[in-house]
Amino acid sequence: MNEILKAKPGEKLYLLGNEAVVRGALEGGVSVASTYPGTPSSEIGDVFFEIAEDAGVYFEFSVNEKVALEVSAAGSVSGLRSFAWMKHVGLNVASDSFMSLAYTGTRGGLVVLSADDPSMFSSQNEQDNRWYARLGNALLMEPSNPQEMLDIMPYAFEVSEKLELPVLLRTTTRVSHMRGVVEVHEIKTAKKVGHFVKDPPKFVPLPSNAYAARKRIAETLEKAKAFASESHWNKIYDLEGNIGIITSGVSFNYIMDVLKDYGLKAKVLKLGFSYPFPEELILKFTESVSEILVVEEVDPVMEKEVLALFGKNYINKPLHGKLDGTLPLIYEYNPDIIKSAFEKVLKINLAKETPIEISSRAPMRPPVFCPGCPHRGLYEAVKIAVKKLGIDAIYPSDIGCYTLGFQPPFKTADYILSMGSSLGTGSGFGKFTDQRVISFIGDSTFFHAGIPALVNAVYHESNLTVIILDNRTTAMTGGQPNPGVKLDNTKAISIEEIVKALNINFIETVDPYSLNHTEKVVEEALKTRGVSVVISKRPCVLITDKSKFYFFVEPEKCTGCKICIQEIACPAMAVGKDGKVFIDPEMCTGCAVCVQTCPEKAIVPKRREK
C-alpha cells in the first residue's frame, strides 16, 4: 500500500482498480476522503486507512453512506477537493443529501464513486446508478480499467470545480476488482485546511433559493453537453466497419476482445464522460455508420438516450441493444454475450472454440460461517430456545455475515430489505402479527441504520426481540472499524449504553461460545413482553489470534450420530469413510461450540503444536 503513496512519476504499479483510484485521488489533490465500507468498493477505504495520515489527507470510515457524503460535501464547499465512495446500494442511503448537491454546488471538486454490482455477487439487488446522475443533476464518468480509474480522478475534480457540480464516478465489480499495470504521475499537494465563505442564497436551499438554483442547474447541464462532446474521455476507435457501437465502462473491454479475436470490423464510440449525454458527438458518430449497437451494463440507459436523440432529429437507422433483445436485459456481460450480439446483428456464425471436457461437475459451495464464527453459537442457542418454547417465530435479518443464518441448519432469515431493515420490519411484524419476532442485526449495521428503527420499535411498543451480533468489526467487507471500536483517533461508542438509554425492559449481553447460558438468556428475552435486547459479544475469529487448543474427535467414543455437524455445520468438521466425524486441526479455531453439542462427549481439546 505504501507504494501507492511513494511511487514516483513514471513508475509503474500493478494495482486493483480500487487501489488505482486512490492514487488518482492523490494525484488530483484530494484533501477529504470518507466512506462506509461496502463491496465492491471496500479496498478504496482499506488503502486510505493505511496511508491517509502520511498523505496528509483527512480520512474517515463514517457511520453510514449519507454521513460520509455529507462530510465530503462540507469539505467541498470549504474549498477542499473531496471524495466519497460507496457500493451501489449505499448511494440509496446517501441519496437524500445527494439530490441537493447540485443545488448547493461545489467549490473544491467533489467526486462521488458508486461501485455497482451487476449479477449481484455481494449485494441484495442489481441496480444501475447511472440513473442517479440524471436524477441528481450530477456529471457522470465511467472508467473501464485501472489506468483510467487513476487518470480520471484529477480530471473529475477539475470538471467538478469548473462546472460547480458533483461528479458521479460509476464503476462496476469487474472494473473495481480488475488488476493491471498503471503508470503514475505527480501527486498534487493537497490543502490542509479549508475555509467556508458564507453564501446563504446558494447554500441554504429554501424553496425560493432552490427555485433560482434549478434554473442555474439546467443551464449548466446544457453547457456541459458540449463539454462532454469535446472531452478526451469520449473516444472513437475506427476499425473500418459499417456498424457503430456505443459503449461505456467494462463493456468496452469485452467489445474490443471480441472484435480482435474474430477479426470483425466496426466503429466504437467509448463514452467515459457519459452524462450529460454528448448529443453532438453521438450525432456525428452515427452519420458515419449504417446501424448502431449499444452495449452497456445494467439498464438500457444510453440506448434510450440514443433513441430519443434519433426521434428528435428524425434519424431512421437500425438500433440494437437490450430493448430489441439483441442483448440480455439483466446481469453483467462477458465476451460470449457480446459475441452472440454480433452474430445477431451481422447475421453470421462466428467460429466456436472447442469446449473443455469436464469429467465431473464441481459441487456447489454456498457461503457459510467461518470455523469458530461467534454467530454460529448464537444461532444454535436461538434454535434451541425457540424449539423449547414451541413458538412460531419470524426472523427479520439484515445485511452482514449473519445473513448466512439463512443457510441450513439454522434457517433464521425470513425477510431482508436493506441495512437496518431487520429492526424496522421487526417493529412492523411485532405490531401486525401474533408471532414472536426475532430480529438479527450486526454491530456495524446497528450504528449504520439500526438505531432509529430500534427507537421506533420502543416508542410504538412493538413486541420484538432484538439480537445484536457484536463481533467488534465490520466483518463482511473486510474487517473495517465501526463506532463501537476504539482507534487512536476515535472514541468508542457503547452499544449497551445506547440500548439502556431507551429504557428497554430486558437487556443482556452474552458470550455466544457459551451455548447453555446464551440459550437461557434468549429464552428469557422471548418471554419478555415488548422490546427485549440480547447483545451477542465476541470478536470475529479473523481479527483474533488462533487458540492454543484445537478439538479432536475420539473415534472410540464417536457413534457417528452426526449431531454436531447437523446442529452447527462447522466447515472444520467432516465425516470419514468409517462414518465417524473428524475435525481438521488447521481449520479448527478452538471455539468449543461443537463440544457442547456432542451427546457422547467424544470431542476433546488438544494443545496445538508450535
Image: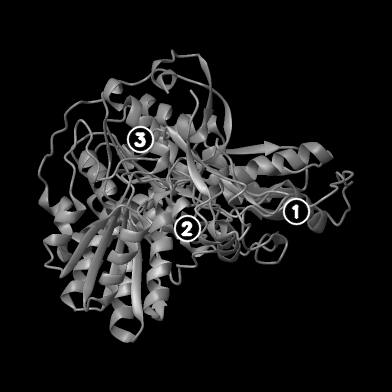
| Sooner in the amino-acid sequence: mark 2 or mark 1 | 1
| Sooner in the amino-acid sequence: mark 2 or mark 3 | 3
- Residue for badge 2: 597
Name the side, left or right, on which 26 lies relative to 56: right
Coordinates of residue 469 in the picture (x, y in percent) = 33, 55
Q: Which residue is drawn at 49% across and 44% down?
A: 604
SS of the residue at dot 3?
helix
| Sooner in the amino-acid sequence: mark 1 or mark 3 | 3
Q: Alpha-carbon neighbours of circle 3 within 10 Å: few (<14), some, or many (≥20)?
A: many
Residue 151: mark in rendering: none
Name the side, left or right, on which 314 lies relative to 76: right
- Residue for badge 1: 290
Q: Alpha-carbon neighbours of circle 1 within 10 Å: few (<14), some, or many (≥20)?
A: some
- Residue for badge 3: 157
SS of the residue at dot 2?
helix
Q: Alpha-carbon neighbours of circle 2 within 10 Å: few (<14), some, or many (≥20)?
A: some
Coordinates of residue 429 in the picture (x, y in percent) = 33, 79
Q: Residue at x 53, y 62 (%)?
A: 407
Q: Can residue 317 be seen in this view?
A: no
Q: Nearer the viewer, residue 316 or 210?
A: 210
Three-letter residue code for mark 3: Phe
Name the side, left or right, on which 243 lies relative to 121: right
Q: Nearer the viewer, residue 354 or 183?
A: 354
Q: Nearer the viewer, mark 1 or mark 3?
A: 3
Q: Residue at x 68, y 61 (%)?
A: 328
Three-letter residue code for mark 2: Thr
What's the colour scheme?
A: one colour
Q: Are marks 2 and 1 in contact (CB under 8 Å)?
A: no
